Amino acid sequence: MIPEPLKTELQSSIAHAVTRREAAVGVMKRLQSHYGWMTDEAVTEAAELLGLSPLQVEELATFYEMIYRRPVGPKVIHVCDSISCWSMGGETLLQQLEHHLEISAGGTTGDGAVTLLPCSCLGNCGNAPAIMIGEQLHGPITVQQALDLVGRR
Amino acid sequence: MEQVLFRHNHPDRMVSLEEYRLEGGFEAWAKAVRAMSPDEVQQAVIDSGLRGRGGAGFPTGKKWSFVPRDLPGPRYLICNCDEMEPGTYKDRVLLEKNPYLLVEGMALAAYALQVNHAFIFIRRGYEQAAHNLRQAIDEARRAGLLGSNILAGGFSLELDLHQSAGRYICGEETALMNALEGLRANPRAKPPFPAIKGLWGQPTVVNNVETLANIPAIIERGPAWWKGLAAIPEAAGTKLFCISGHVQKTECIELPLGITLGEIIDGPCGGMRPGSSFKACIPGGASTPYFTSDHWQVAMDFDAVAKAGSRLGTGGIVVFDQNTCMVGATLNLIRFFARESCGWCTPCREGLPFVQHILERIEDGLGRPEDIDILREHVQRLNYAFCALAPGAMGPVEGLLRLFGDELDEHIAKGKCPFKGSRSH
Ligand SMILES: Cc1cc2nc3c(=O)[nH]c(=O)nc-3n(C[C@H](O)[C@H](O)[C@H](O)COP(=O)(O)O)c2cc1C
Ligand code: SF4
Ligand code: FES
């Protein structure tokens, strides 16, 4: 169950939209930040708020890169694997992070704290190799700096 | 060099509304709302020769003129800030430095189109840009530059921000409208074109951030002045180039359209990095065929770049040095497009992973001579996809076949990638 203030906040964002559906992505993102990921419960709650079926929400949730339908750690490192970062050593950076965090790309550390995800261009190509931790862009970045940022050194 | 889009920029922070106005900001808007008709604004944009900065280079004023003036019901303007084409980051830099320019440009476009409700569709991860925009919209509203009865001229405009959750296809204008409506972001069939039937079935114009941000200068200083900013008479205005890869300075820079590739790389980019020499570049974002040193003198403008076999695209220039494997680069690009395929139509959903597989095979030393023909055939076949993503994806493959056939052959003949181990990182 989501707390009342959050529910009120979401209802008012839906009321502001031209159609209820228009608010769907915003609602999913807000619920995700509440739960940490887009849980089954969150899908049902989003559906109720938006006047959609859970399946219609699922159809959206599975479409977007930044909606997590599986648990992730409180710290998510997104490592850009697109062309500019590739040209500046992005592949090596990802391998080094896998090595130091002892997980493979897509995984979460044993203590559940850090998730490592390769991702498409972050729009930070001039600062390659680029990563995003939470919603903060970083780059150019070394493996040590990245580990520092998630408290893993 | 004359700057239009970056004129108000500070190195370390966003310009303030006060500073922007002291330097002439919102004067174009005031002038239009008080003293110009919507048609006059549209005509100025037509006369300026402004072409869309979102990738296709469609003439902006002409696009606006397709919107019927007499259909009942609302019409919409959408600013496309999805910016997920690898190698492209200009819209982010622009909004981080000066969101007012976009607010003013959108106000002018909305006025010309008689739109009262406009949207900015912004990609995931652009939190700072979104934050700046929200601030700019709030301030503009409080200053009476947005909202109802703006500057007592009788025109009203609401601007809403929609933050997306990350998928490249959301930048395609009809997929974008689905995304905005809260539908799964597959593209829509055209026709009907958005100008007739777009967002919620109403007439809609979609323009890129940079396109819209040019409009205040066109209105303020006049279309002839703006057009003359270009380096060659066939071009019009300036362009934000986003530089990345193996050059000294990898920044977003505003330059006259029509400047040559060589001038960009040797000039503002500061040349290649130590130990690197120029081999090739992507001239306009991930979907554009490569340029090599043979293209050094090409004027970076829409028509000239097209004539030289590529596209100006978004102006995202990714530079590669002598140690770069072009098969590897192309494989990286195809992986991106295969991942970002929205899955709606078969040629793209099935074809791109297949092409990826062939390139992987070649890069891993398992390529076969007939693979070249398969690749060539797929450059043709993927033109039959439902939207422009798949043909765009094949741009680099086409360039690879045309310009780096030797390199492909060498991979196949030697049974390995000749560049393995040639780079330190
Ligand atoms: C797959 C795909 C992705 C696109 N992504 C963007 C984008 O991120 N930003 C953008 O402005 N245009 C993008 N476009 C182009 C838009 O469809 C549209 O042409 C453009 O926003 C129109 O603006 P303009 O006329 O100002 O250039 C994309 C097109 C395709 C096919
Ligand atoms: S070409 Fe690709 S992205 Fe476009 S509709 Fe088909 S599957 Fe979707
Ligand atoms: S290619 Fe990595 S941020 Fe754009």
Image (spheres, coloured by chain):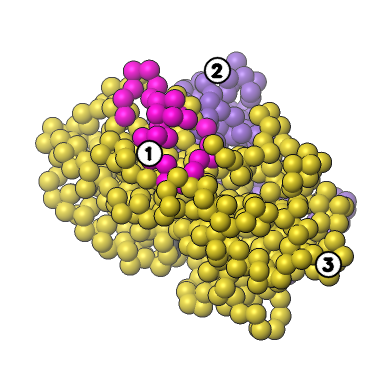
Chain colours: A purple, B yellow
Residue B185 position in % (x across, y down): 55, 62
Query: Picture quarter containing residue B150?
Result: bottom right
Q: Is mark 3 within 8 Å of ligand 1?
A: no
Q: Secondary structure at mark 3?
A: loop
Q: Amino acid at mark 1?
A: Leu
Q: In the image shown, does A99 or A14 lie closer to the viewer? A: A14
Circles 1 and 3 in contact, beta carbons < 8 Å: no
Residue B384 position in % (x across, y down): 33, 67
Q: Is mark 1 within 8 Å of ligand 3?
A: no
Q: Secondary structure at mark 2?
A: helix
Tell how many labels: 3
Disc 3 crowd rating (10 Å Cα; few below 14, some 14-19, many 20+) is few
Q: Amino acid at mark 3?
A: Gly
Q: Earlier in the sequence, mark 1 or mark 3?
A: 3
| Both marks 3 and 2 on one chain | no
Q: In the image shown, does B156 or B192 lie closer to the viewer? A: B156
Q: Secondary structure at mark 1?
A: helix
Tell me how far mark 2 sits from mark 1, CA to CA: 36 Å
The residue carrying mark 3 is B153
Tell me how far mark 1 sits from mark 3, CA to CA: 45 Å
Disc 1 crowd rating (10 Å Cα; few below 14, some 14-19, many 20+) is many
Question: Extreme top residue here?
Answer: A153
Q: Is residue B328 depicted above or below B29 in this figure?
A: above
User: What is the number of the mark on residue A144?
Assistant: 2
Residue at 13% x, 32% y is: B414
Residue A21 position in % (x across, y down): 69, 66
Bounds of the magenta segment? B251-278
